Amino acid sequence: MDTKVESDHTSGKNRTTVERKSGREFVVTRTFNAPARIVFEAWTRPELLRRWWAPKSFGISFLSCEADVRAGGAYRFVFGHAASEQPMAFFGRYIEVTAHARLVWTNDEGDEGGAVTTVTFEESGGETRVVLHDLYPSKEALDGAIASGATSGFGEAFEQLDQLLVTTSASVGGS
Amino acid sequence: MVQYTRAHLDASFAALSDATRRGVLEQLGRADASITDLAEKFHMTLTGMKKHVGVLEQVGLVATEKVGRVRTCKLGPRRLAEEMAWIEEHRQLWASRFDELDKVVEELRQKEKVDGHQS
């Protein structure tokens, strides 16, 4: 069975897609080779969640992971990042928890207007399609998140912008 | 992995720390505007606003076009490139997460098989 998972990877079947659906939302999708109740379990038990939410290959690691997964329950994830001295905290509240089907939570770490995340688990033929939907309160809020590289730490876009800004501030002076 | 020095981060935050420039980007995210519109909106002189727009235009965050006597400003091409890079980075984050989640899910599935769960 392990080989099947591997071959699914190479054929691109389990490819993760990310798409900006509109001014206010973006959507992540991926299919898993297991029934919805198993995939759901991995999202809702903190000791399982902490094994995959902060991937080592992305340079982040959990410092702490607390999640009270029920409607009204709070979560708080604290990460360390190789490129940052300060730990990063992400926190909010679960709004909806429907077993094996749907999770909705708020993202309250920003100064104002964080996204609401909805995750649905759609089972079909023993596989589960996971659709994660981040809905921002306004286009400005999503544009702002993109401009500041908010959720992803420091990326290549930021580095490029960084170089341009250094060049510009040098040529313009402190205007 | 990209390496960042504190000096690099400080320089970029300093450049974007100007509230007027951030406000101009927000404003242009809603609708295109002339320099005059922007100057009025932010209670500035035309010269002051031209300077800010010039900074944003140089880094590609704003594009301007002169039609007749009016210079119209809109979000620039840099914005789009930035957005595409952000989405790609997001995809990489989620792909990495989901590769790890695959392992957890497979482990749970095997465990369930051993435990003889029926459904």
Image: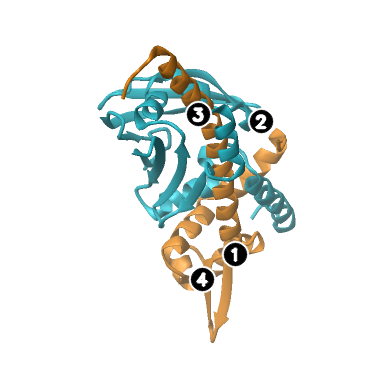
Chain colours: A cyan, B orange
Percent from the top left, x then y, of residue A118? Answer: 34, 40
Residue A57, picture quadrant: top right
The answer as to whether the residues below labels 4 and 3 share one chain is yes
Looking at the rendered image, the quarter that the N terminus of chain A falls into is: top right
Earlier sequence position, callout 4 versus callout 3:
4
Is residue B7 among the parts visible in the rendering? yes
SS class, disc 1:
helix
Which of the two discs, 3 and 2, sits closer to the camera?
3
The answer as to whether the residues below labels 3 and 2 share one chain is no
A98 left or right of B37 in image? left
- The residue where tag 1 is placed is B77
User: Could you tell me the amino acid type at mark 4?
Assistant: Ile
Percent from the top left, x then y, of residue B24? Answer: 49, 59
Give the farthest residue toward the bottom.
B68
Earlier sequence position, callout 3 versus callout 1:
1
User: Could you tell me the amino acid type at mark 1?
Assistant: Pro
Crowding around mark 4 (Cα neighbors within 10 Å: few <14, some 14 to 19, many 20+) is many
- Pointer 3 with pointer 1, Cβ within 8 A: no
Q: CA distance from mark 3 to mark 1?
A: 36 Å
SS class, disc 3:
helix
Chain bearing mark 1: B
Residue A171, picture quadrant: bottom right
Using the image, tell me which numbered label, if any, was put on residue B101: 3
Which of the two discs, 1 and 4, sits closer to the camera?
1
Is residue B42 among the parts visible in the rendering? no
